[in-house]
Amino acid sequence: LRAELTEAVEAAPDLAALDEVRVAALGKKGRVTALMKSLGGMDPEQRKAFGQEMNRVKDAVARTIEQRRATLEAAALEDRLQHERIDVTLSARPEGTGSIHPISQTWDEVVAIFGQMGFAVAEGPDIEDDFHNFTALNFPPDHPAREMHDTFFLPERPDGSRHVLRTHTSPVQIRTMLSQKPPIRVLAPGRTYRSDSDMTHTPMFHQVEGLVIDQATHMGHLKGCLQEFVEAYFEVDDVPMRFRPSFFPFTEPSAEVDIGCSRKDGDLRIGAGDDWLEILGCGMVHPNVLRACGLDPAEYQGFAFGVGLERIAMLKYGIPDLRTFFESDLRWLRHYGFGA
Ligand code: PHE
C-alpha cells in the first residue's frame, strides 16, 4: 500500500491531482483511514503492531505528499514567472484625458502675447459698484450710454446703491490707475456679463482689457501694439487693419478695429482680402477718466482696448455659434480639435 500510494503521489501532475490522491488516501473515506478504522476489531497484540505500522505508512504518505506539493508549487510559480512577465517598457493603453477649454487656451495665448510686449496681468471683481463700472469711466448719471450695456443689477443695498455684474473689463482700468502710479501697462482678462442671448451673445462672456498710461503715449503706439497682437494671435503676417471712428464714454478718440479677411465658399481666412471683420474697441483714455483716478491729463495720457475672447476664438477656429462654448459637449470640443 505504501509503495502504491507513494507512486500515486509522485505521479500527480498538478496540485489538483495531488489533492485527489491525498483525499483518496488520508481523507475521511480514504484507504489509510479505512485501515485505521479496522483496528477496532483486532485483538490487542495485533492492534499494537498493525497500528504502529499504519502510523508509519500514514506519516510517510503525508510526508511524500508535502514534498510533492512543494515541488508542484515551485513549478507552478516558475511557470507563472515565465508566462506572466510584464513588459514595463510598453506604452500605457490610451485613456481619455482632460483638455484645456478653448476659452482658457485663448486667454492664456493672449496673455502670453501681450506678456512679451511687457504687459502685466491685472484683476478686478466680477461684482462691481456703479463707480468703477460706469461713473469713473465717464458714463454720466442717467446717460443713455449706460443702457448700451444690458446690465445685470444686484438687489439694492441699505444705502440705496446697486452693485452690478460688470458689463465689461474696463472697471479694471480704474482699479489699476487708482492703485498704481504710471507708467502703467496692464492686461485684464476676465468674465463679463450682459443680459443678452443669441448666436453671438451669451449672458456671460470674456473680455481682455488693455491699458497703457505714460507721459508720451499716442495712437501710433496703440496701432502698433494691436497690429503686433493680431499677427501673433492669428499667425498671419501683414494683416490689414482699419480703425473706424466710434464712441465709448471712456475714450476720446474712440475706434473700432476691423481686420482684413476673405471668404471663399463659407471659408473664412484672416489676412489680405476684400472683406472686414470687427474684432475690438479701443481709444485714447478720456481726460475725465484720468481725472477720476487722480491723474493730471496734462502730464499723463494713454490708450485702452477691449477684446472679446470668444469672438477672436470663433474667428480663429471657425466656430459659428457662441453659445456652444458653454454647453460642455465633448463632441464639440473634439470637433474643433480641443478634446482628447
Ligand atoms: N469696454 C468696451 C466694451 O465693452 C470695449 C473698450 C475697452 C473700448 C477699452 C475702448 C477701450 O465694448
Image (tube, rainbow, N blue to C red):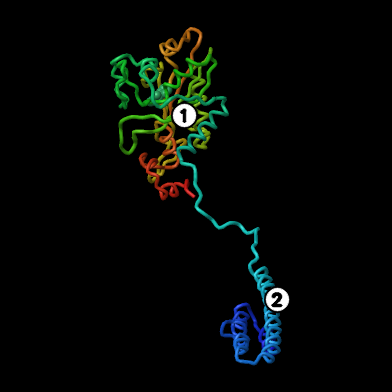
Q: Nearer the viewer, residue 315 or 89?
A: 89
Q: Which residue is depicted at the point 48% across and 19% down?
A: 176
Can residue 244 be seen in the rendering of this structure?
no
The part of the image, by quadrant, that contains residue 47 is bottom right
Residue 256 in the image, given as x and y percentages of width and height:
40, 25
The numbered dot on residue 71 is 2
Mark 2 to mark 1 CA distance (whole Å)? 72 Å
| Quarter of the rendered structure image containing ligand 1 | top left
Q: Quick one: label 2, few (<14), some, or many (20+) residues within 10 Å? A: few
Residue 282 in the image, given as x and y percentages of width and height:
43, 23
Q: Which residue is depicted at the point 61% across and 57% down?
A: 91
Residue 60 in the image, given as x and y percentages of width and height:
71, 82
Q: How many marks?
A: 2
Question: Which callout, 2 or 1, points to the residue nearer the camera?
Answer: 2
Residue 185 in the image, given as x and y percentages of width and height:
53, 21
Q: Earlier in the sequence, mark 2 or mark 1?
A: 2
Can residue 251 be seen in the rendering of this structure?
yes
Reply above or below: 286 against 189. Answer: above
Q: Nearer the viewer, residue 31 or 147?
A: 31
Ligand 1 within 8 angstroms of badge 2 C-beta? no
Q: Nearer the viewer, residue 27 or 21?
A: 27
Quarter of the image with the N terminus in it:
bottom right
Element marked by disc 2? helix
What amino acid type should be assigned to the residue bearing mark 1?
Answer: Pro
Element marked by disc 1? strand
The numbered dot on residue 5 is none
Reply above or below: 89 against 317. Answer: below
Q: Which residue is mark 1?
A: 189
Q: Quick one: label 1, few (<14), some, or many (20+) residues within 10 Å? A: many
Reply above or below: 246 against 50. Answer: above
